[in-house]
Amino acid sequence: MDAMRSATRDEEGLKRRFWEKLKRVAGKIPFAEDLLAAFYCATDAKTPSRVKLILLGAIAYFVFPMDAVSDFLPLLGFADDAAVLAAAITQVAGSITEDHRLKARETLGQLTPEQP
């Protein structure tokens, strides 16, 4: 828990680790668009501090290497990340705007190859 608190305090380091991990796994996780929308909301200057804190906590859990369930396990590896993100989004759903979602879709399209 202390490591996650530290990760949310180091916002620039968290952003860097977020992008590194997302680029590796974007095509493998079904919640990538929600994760990106949450990221864009958390880094939006207009987002209230309480919302940013909740979303940054979920993002820190995503990038933190010591999950409850290891990310390298097939099918189950990202289930805990998805659950934490879903809980965070439920708490702040009204703050994630259509602009955040649109930017997430655009970014995801650039990160993942087109499916035939």
Image (cartoon, rainbow, N blue to C red):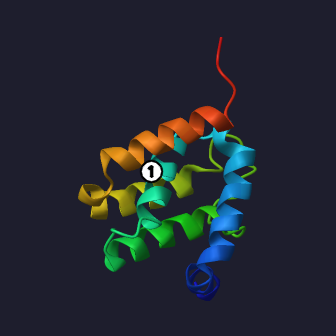
Image x and y of residue 5, in percent: 56, 85
Residue in the image at 58% along x and 70% along y: 60
Q: Secondary structure at mark 1?
A: helix
Residue in the image at 65% along x and 61% along y: 18
Q: Which residue of the protein is positioned furthest toward the top in this rendering?
A: 116
* Occupied quadrant, residue 101: top left
Q: Is residue 48 left or right of residue 3?
A: left
* Closer to the camera in the image, 88 or 10: 10
In the rendered image of this protein, does residue 98 appear above or below residue 51? above
* Occupied quadrant, residue 85: bottom left
Image x and y of residue 113, in percent: 69, 26
Image x and y of residue 73, in percent: 73, 48
Q: Which residue matches tag 1? A: 37
In the rendered image of this protein, does residue 26 appear above or below residue 51? above
In the rendered image of this protein, does residue 115 appear above or below residue 86? above
Circle 1: is it few (<14), some (14-19), or many (20+) Cα within 10 Å? Answer: many
Residue in the image at 65% along x and 11% along y: 116
In the rendered image of this protein, does residue 15 appear above or below residue 37? below
Q: Quadrant of the N terminus?
A: bottom right
* Closer to the camera in the image, 64 or 72: 64
Callout 1 amino acid: Ala
Q: Which residue of the protein is positioned furthest toward the front in this rendering?
A: 45
Image x and y of residue 53, in percent: 42, 77
Q: Is residue 103 left or right of residue 93?
A: right
Q: Count the marks: how many?
A: 1
Q: Which residue of the protein is positioned furthest toward the left in this rendering?
A: 94
Q: Is residue 28 left or right of residue 87?
A: right
